[in-house]
Image: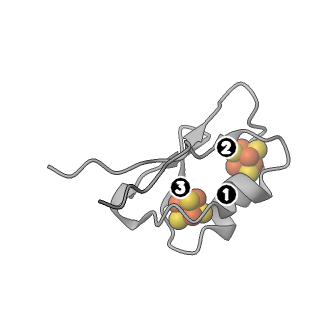
Amino acid sequence: MKQLPMPIINKQRCTRCGQCISQCPTQAVEMIDQYPMIVHPAQCTYCGICEEICPLNAVELLYTITVHQ
Ligand code: SF4
Ligand code: SF4
């Protein structure tokens, strides 16, 4: 099974404003139990928009590297 990197949403910081949901270009995020969740991980392109637009810096994309061999 392929492992996909996912943005991490910090529930302690999140104010549930919904911007990460409305601005995700692939509709990968939805509100579940009043908090945003990456409910469609296969749709996430790891574009970084949710991290960039979150006013509370509650979204973090883990650092990734590409190794060329
Ligand atoms: S943009 Fe940030 S504060 Fe707003 S719902 Fe998403 S994670 Fe929460
Ligand atoms: S990284 Fe991009 S595609 Fe993935 S959840 Fe955030 S905005 Fe959507």
Q: Is mark 1 within 8 Å of ligand 2?
A: yes
Which dot, 3 or 2, sits closer to the camera?
Answer: 2
Which dot, 3 or 1, sits closer to the camera?
Answer: 1
- Marks 1 and 2 close (CB-CB < 8 Å): yes
Residue 39 spot, x, y in % from top left: 42, 52
Q: Residue furthest top?
A: 12
User: What secondary structure is found at the residue carrying circle 3?
Assistant: strand
Query: Mark 2 or mark 3, which is nearer the start of the sequence?
Result: 3
Query: Mark 1 or mark 3, which is nearer the start of the sequence?
Result: 3
Rendered residue at 39%/58% (across/down): 40
Residue 27 spot, x, y in % from top left: 51, 69
Instruction: Residue type at mark 2: give it.
Output: Val
- In the rendered view, does 17 fall on the left or right side of 9? right
User: For mark 2, what is the residue?
Assistant: 59
How many numbered tags mark residues here?
A: 3
- Marks 3 and 2 close (CB-CB < 8 Å): no
Rendered residue at 76%/30% (across/down): 13
| Nearer the observer, 51 or 30 | 51
Rendered residue at 47%/51% (across/down): 65
User: For mark 3, what is the residue?
Assistant: 30
| Alpha carbon distance from label 3 to label 2 | 14 Å
User: What secondary structure is found at the residue carrying circle 1?
Assistant: helix
Instruction: Residue type at mark 3: give it.
Output: Glu
| Alpha carbon distance from label 3 to label 1 | 12 Å
In the figure, residue 25 lies in which quadrant?
bottom right
Query: Mark 2 or mark 1, which is nearer the start of the sequence?
Result: 1
User: For mark 1, what is the residue?
Assistant: 50
Q: How many C-alpha atoms fall within 10 Å of the one at disc 3: few (<14), some, or many (≥20)?
A: some
